[in-house]
C-alpha cells in the first residue's frame, strides 16, 4: 500500500515539475507572437502546459487501446466486421453525417496513400520520442540532475529543435505532410460538393432571418455602450448565420439518417445472413431468399427510430465513449461551412 502511495506521489511530482517547465517554454515562445496576442498566450501558458502533460500521460494508454482494438478487429471474421460497420452506420448515420461522408470520400480520394503517409509520420514521431527520452536522461556534468531540466527555456527550445532536426528524415516528413494535405484537400472538395445544398440552404435561411431583424439593430445599439456599438451588426448577422446553419444541418441529418439507416441495415442483414450460412447455422431455401432483406429493413427501422428518439444526440454512456468522434464531426462540419462564401 505504501509503495502504491509513493509511486502516485512521484507521478504527481513529475507532472507538477513537467507542467511548470512546459509553461516556461510557452511563455518564452509567446515573445515570438504578435504583441496583441502575447498577453493571452502567457495567461494560457499554465493551462496549455497542463493539457500537454495530460496528453503525454494519456498517450501510451491511447496507443495501447488502439492496438487492442486493431487486434480485436483483425481477429474477427471479415463478414462480421462488415456487418458491424453496417450496424454502426444504421444507428449513427444521422449523428455523424459529415464524418461518414468524409470516410467515404477518403476511400475514394487516395485513402491507401494517406494511410501510408500517416504510418511514415508515426514512425518519425516514434524516433523523435525515443531520442527525446534519451536526451531527457543525459547528465553530462554528473550532478545527478538531467541537463535538459537545468537549462533556461530559450536554450531548451533550441536544444529540442536541434534534436528533432537531427532525428527525422526531411524527405519522409515532407512526403508525409504533402500526402496528407493533398488527401485532405480532395476530401474537402468532395464534401463541399456533397453538402453544397446544405450550405446554400443555410445561407438562404440566414438571409431570410436577417432581413427583418436588421431593423432592430438601432434599438440594440442603444442598449450597448458606445464603444461596442460597431459590433452589433456583425453580432446579429453571425447569430442569424449560426442559427440558419443549425437548421440546415438538422435537415441534412434527417436525410442522412434515412439514407444511412437503409444502407447500413441492408449491409448488416446481407453479411449477417452470409456469415450464418457460412457457419451452417442456417440453410437457404426459396422461402429464405429474402431473409437478409427482412433483417436489414427491420434493423434499418430500429436504427432510424433510435436516432429520432434521441434527437440525433448520443445517450449516456455513448456520448462519452464517442466523444472524440463528436469532435471530429464538429471540425469537419465547421470546415465545410467555412469553405463556403456565405455573405449575409
Image (cartoon, grey):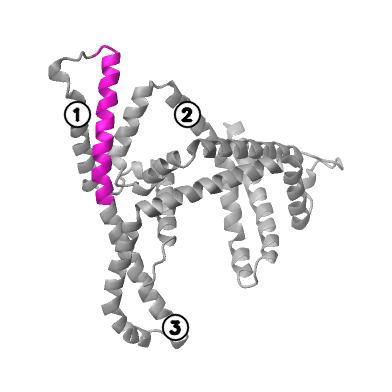
As drawn, 256 above or below 230 = above
Q: For this view, does 152 lie left or right of residue 27?
A: right
Instruction: Pick out the residue farthest to the right.
Output: 141
- Which of discs 2 and 1 lies nearer the camera? The answer is 1
Judging by the rendered image, the residue that carries numbered circle 3 is: 230
Q: Is residue 114 magenta?
A: no
Coordinates of residue 281 in the picture (x, y in percent): 24, 13
What predominant SS class does the magenta segment belong to?
A: helix
**Distance between the Cα atoms at labels 2 and 1?**
30 Å
Q: Which mark is on residue 70?
A: 2
Counting residues from the N terminus, which is met first, the one under dot 3 or under dot 2?
A: 2
Q: For this view, does 297 lie left or right of residue 169?
A: left
**Distance between the Cα atoms at labels 1 and 3?**
60 Å
The answer to whether marks 3 and 2 mark residues whose Cβ atoms lie closer than 8 Å is no
Q: Is residue 274 magenta?
A: yes
Q: Which residues are magenta?
A: 253-281
| Secondary structure at numbered mark 3 | helix
Callout 3: few (<14), some (14-19), or many (20+) C-alpha neighbours within 10 Å? few
Instruction: Determine the residue positioned at 28% across, 53% down.
Output: 252
The answer to whether marks 2 and 1 mark residues whose Cβ atoms lie closer than 8 Å is no
* Camera sees residue 295: yes
Q: Which mark is on residue 293?
A: 1
Q: Quadrant of residue 306?
A: top left
Q: Quadrant of the C terminus?
A: bottom left
Q: Quadrant of residue 335?
A: bottom left
Instruction: Determine the residue positioned at 74% across, 46% down.
Output: 165
Instruction: Pick out the residue farthest to the left.
Output: 287
Q: Of 175 and 143, which appears nearest the observer?
A: 175
| Secondary structure at numbered mark 2 | helix
Callout 1: few (<14), some (14-19), or many (20+) C-alpha neighbours within 10 Å? some
Amino acid at each position: 500500500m505504501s509503495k502504491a502511495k509513493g509511486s502516485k506521489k512521484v507521478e504527481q511530482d513529475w507532472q507538477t515539475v513537467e507542467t511548470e517547465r512546459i509553461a516556461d517554454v510557452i511563455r518564452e515562445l509567446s515573445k515570438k507572437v504578435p504583441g496583441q496576442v502575447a498577453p493571452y498566450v502567457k495567461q494560457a501558458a499554465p493551462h496549455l502546459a497542463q493539457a500537454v502533460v495530460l496528453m503525454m500521460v494519456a498517450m501510451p494508454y491511447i496507443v495501447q487501446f488502439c492496438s487492442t482494438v486493431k487486434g480485436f478487429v483483425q481477429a474477427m471474421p471479415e463478414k462480421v466486421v462488415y456487418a458491424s460497420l453496417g450496424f454502426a452506420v444504421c444507428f449513427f448515420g444521422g449523428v455523424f453525417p459529415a464524418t461518414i461522408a468524409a470516410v467515404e470520400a477518403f476511400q475514394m480520394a487516395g485513402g491507401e496513400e494517406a494511410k501510408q503517409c500517416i504510418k511514415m509520420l508515426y514512425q518519425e514521431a516514434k524516433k523523435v520520442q525515443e531520442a527525446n527520452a534519451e536526451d531527457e536522461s543525459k547528465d553530462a556534468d554528473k550532478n545527478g540532475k538531467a541537463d535538459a531540466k537545468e537549462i533556461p527555456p530559450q536554450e531548451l527550445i533550441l536544444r529540442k529543435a536541434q534534436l528533432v532536426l537531427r532525428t527525422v528524415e526531411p524527405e519522409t516528413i515532407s512526403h508525409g505532410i504533402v500526402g496528407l494535405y493533398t488527401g485532405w484537400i480532395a476530401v474537402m472538395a468532395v464534401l463541399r460538393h456533397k453538402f453544397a445544398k446544405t450550405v446554400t440552404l443555410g445561407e438562404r435561411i440566414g438571409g431570410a432571418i436577417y432581413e427583418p431583424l436588421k431593423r432592430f439593430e438601432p434599438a440594440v445599439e442603444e442598449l450597448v455602450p458606445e464603444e461596442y456599438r460597431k459590433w452589433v451588426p456583425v453580432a446579429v448577422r453571425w447569430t442569424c448565420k449560426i442559427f440558419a446553419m443549425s437548421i440546415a444541418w438538422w435537415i441534412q441529418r434527417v436525410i442522412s439518417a434515412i439514407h444511412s439507416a437503409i444502407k447500413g441495415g441492408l449491409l448488416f442483414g446481407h453479411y449477417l445472413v452470409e456469415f450464418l450460412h457460412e457457419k451452417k447455422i442456417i440453410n437457404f431455401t426459396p422461402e429464405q431468399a429474402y431473409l437478409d432483406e427482412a433483417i436489414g429493413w427491420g434493423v434499418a427501422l430500429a436504427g432510424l427510430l433510435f436516432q429520432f428518439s434521441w434527437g440525433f444526440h448520443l445517450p449516456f454512456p455513448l456520448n462519452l465513449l464517442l466523444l472524440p468522434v463528436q469532435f471530429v464531426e464538429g471540425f469537419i462540419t465547421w470546415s465545410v461551412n467555412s469553405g463556403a462564401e456565405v455573405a449575409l
